[in-house]
Image (cartoon, coloured by chain):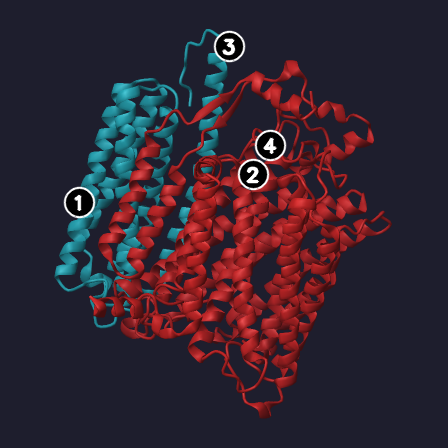
Amino acid sequence: MWEGFRHFADTYLMWNEGPLIWMSDVLILLTSIGIVAVLTYFKKWKWLWDEWLTTVDHKKIGIMYLICALLMFFRGGVDALLMRTQLALPNNHFLDAEHYDQIFTTHGTIMILFMAMPFIFALFNIAVPLQIGARDVAFPYLNAISFWLFFFGALLFNISFVFGGSPDAGWTSYPPLSELAFDKGPGENFYLLGLQISGIGSIATGINFMATILKMRAPGMTLMRMPLFTWSVLAACVVIIFAFPALTVALALLLLDRIVGTHFFTILHGGNPMMFINLFWIWGHPEVYIVILPAFGVFSEVVATFARKRIFGYGSMVVALMAISVISFFVWVHHFFTMGAGADVNTFFAVATMAVGIPTGVKVFNWLFTMYRGRIRMSLPMLWTVAFVPCFAIGGATGVMLAVAPADYQYHNSYFLIAHFHQVLIGGTVFGMLAGMYYWWPKMFGFLLDERLGRWAFWFFNIGFYVCFMPQYALGFMGMQRRMYTYPADLGWGTLNFISTIGAYLMGIGFLFMVAQIIYSIRYGQRDLTGDPWDGRTLEWSLPSPVPHYNFAVIPTVEDRDYWWVLKQQGRTQELRPRPEEIQPIHMPKNSGRPFLMGVAFFVAGIGFVFNWYVLAVLGLLGVVACMVARAFEYDDEYHIPVEEVQHTEAALGRL
Amino acid sequence: MAVVHEASDAFNVREHGHHHDEDALRIFGFWIFLTSDLILFACLFATYVILSNHTGSGPTPADMFDVPAFTAETIILLTSSFTCGLATFAMHHGRRGLMLTWLIVTLLLGLAFVGLEASEFTRNALAGATMQRSAFLSAFYTLVGTHGCHVSFGILWMTSILIQAWRKGLAGEIPGKVFIVGLYWHFLDVVWVFIFTVVYLMGVMR
């Protein structure tokens, strides 16, 4: 009995690993008890189930994505601080090599797939239906499935830390290192299945928003009248639909290698590891455009709103977005110029990579020209946008340096590369997502985030960013390679690494200010009573904050780009207020618990495959099939909101 | 998608229009899904083409493929696609009985296809050509097997729709569902044409 317990604790709970794990176990246990206790004490279980776990409302799903993204930002950030602490001094042994490997793997995977992806999906969900004048997305039930697959995929990945062991083959997980022969623990399986499950959800989101944008726009909203954020989501969805299946295949084949014993990427029996690397980057490079394009969309909205001008060069912005989404599929080999594909192949991919700079440059200049002679207000969304421009320009320039294939033989996998991609991913995506969060926060919650604490967060995060990453460019030139867990003192890297670590901690303080800002603002933040706190331009600002769950009592008819702004200029805002006689019963989808249960079933199947417990895996998959069959035979999944209820809600909001 | 309803009052007209819009939206969404599924197959094809001559110590395609068997599979699946089209055609003309008949024929042909493929796989595996034997065999079983899983899933799906059409007739959401499962079935047929060409024909010709 005791022996059995010892075996379980050492094998699955990893209690022989020491205090880091014990501390995490205690923290997780206390947090879980805390959550359960609070929900029980305040009798909130039913509320949680009815209002959140079963919801198909795009606004609530968006909020859940946002909460997850912020939590994962914290987890990924703690990983980053652990790494920087380890690297602060030469010959440091704060972490051992194995733990360092696990931490850089989880940091990368979480930041890309479980922070950036849910963050963009949060903004998709919150803004797109409101911007195009729709009551919900095209397939609300599928939208809920997407969220729960993401949620349980992320849970599966994160749980590896305290149950079975974290993956340690890097976020790119290259074979043959990630093959069973060299990586025996369940960690790599956690990586493969966590990403696979959330990836299915991402494909579904891409399909859903593409259909929403192309088919659900309000009358009069032609494609060329769409807000640029919606355009950027459309561009991102095109990339998702064409890129994610490649990840699905790469992960599935590696999983087959590991659990069935096939030879796709082993070196034995004709397997070819480069095939994985190609498939991975055929998804992986478009993936970074998936997370940057919505950020570009946010900047376009923010710049126009806070400079109080029409966006400069709308048409060229649209063309640039679409051009980036197409070119994104022709650059993947630049991640492995050193593979030895030959000068001709490398030349093609080098030129294609540099070509991305052209549409991106068009966009940057358009933002600058929009600001030119505008009456700029430096509110938080604009502050992050302005900070983005120089940061992304430097990141873009170092990107072009890396794109020069012969020179890349020198930079490849050095800290120069690390600094480059952090500069574009933080300076582009993170700044953009934060700008978007500040911008749409009042629309989601009905209050603004505190400006003063937000500025502290901004300055700590920004200064911290440059202090952290500028030294890393130099370290790259000095020969420091990525993923090395320590270095000897006589190489002279100590000072710059120490400075870089200081910068990382400054960014951490910036994040804490954001947390403080959110907590403070829930109580004291300025309430948004008008629904239009920024003097906005697009349809979402014509609605009250937070938006009633049917969005528009009467679907508006759009006559121009930036229609809400136009109506304000012409003193015609009354036209978007519902008139009592126009209100009709509204069709809405019913809530359903099945998407959540389907996520649970996928999670159970995932655990089963991770540990090769096939009975559990089959049970999980049967659960998935059961959910699908139940859905197939479901007919009555919509209801009407009666006219009186809509009138009552609108009257209470003072809009009738 | 013309399923004519006699609708007397305004509410029914709106309801009918609503279903029509919903169907069009679902069909559009399903087309996008097929695009991404096509990319999935494209990646598997690329993997297969790269690995198809990495036979290691195992059999080559020419050693393994059985011409009568894969020809039979092809003819059966192409025919099932035709009968599936006939089912949709019957539905458009409001002939429920005929539609059900053609769907049942399609399902039987689908089952025959899956059965033949399963026996081909079993025969090869028992002869030692398992998916663990070489990179070529890993890629072969995965590509063709993924298609087979899609067909099996399609059989389950079509059965569920058959039951619904049996019970509820051609009202409401049923025609849209029949049309979408038909799209899926034809899509699998198109993928098979590529498997037939790239895997089997080019395999035996080498």
Residue B10 numbered tag: 3
Q: Residues within 10 Å of mark 2 (few under 14, many from 20)?
A: many
Image position of A153 (left or right of A454): left
Judging by the rendered image, the residue that carries numbered circle 2 is A59
Instruction: Indicate the position of residue A331 as horizontal and vertical percent values.
Output: 55, 63
Assign the C terminus of chain A to one quadrant of the image: top right
Q: Colour of chain A?
A: red
Q: Residue B179 carries which label?
A: none
- The span from disc 2 to disc 3 (Cα, nearest Å) is 32 Å
Residue A267 position within the rendered picture, expressed as x and y whole percent measured from the top left: 32, 74
Residue plotted at (48% across, 54% down): A243
Using the rendered image of the protein, determine whether residue B46 is visible from the camera's viewpoint: no
The kind of residue on which mark 4 rests is: Arg
Q: What element carries label 3?
A: helix
Q: Name the residue under label 4.
A: A217
Q: Say yes or no: labels 2 and 3 on the same chain.
A: no
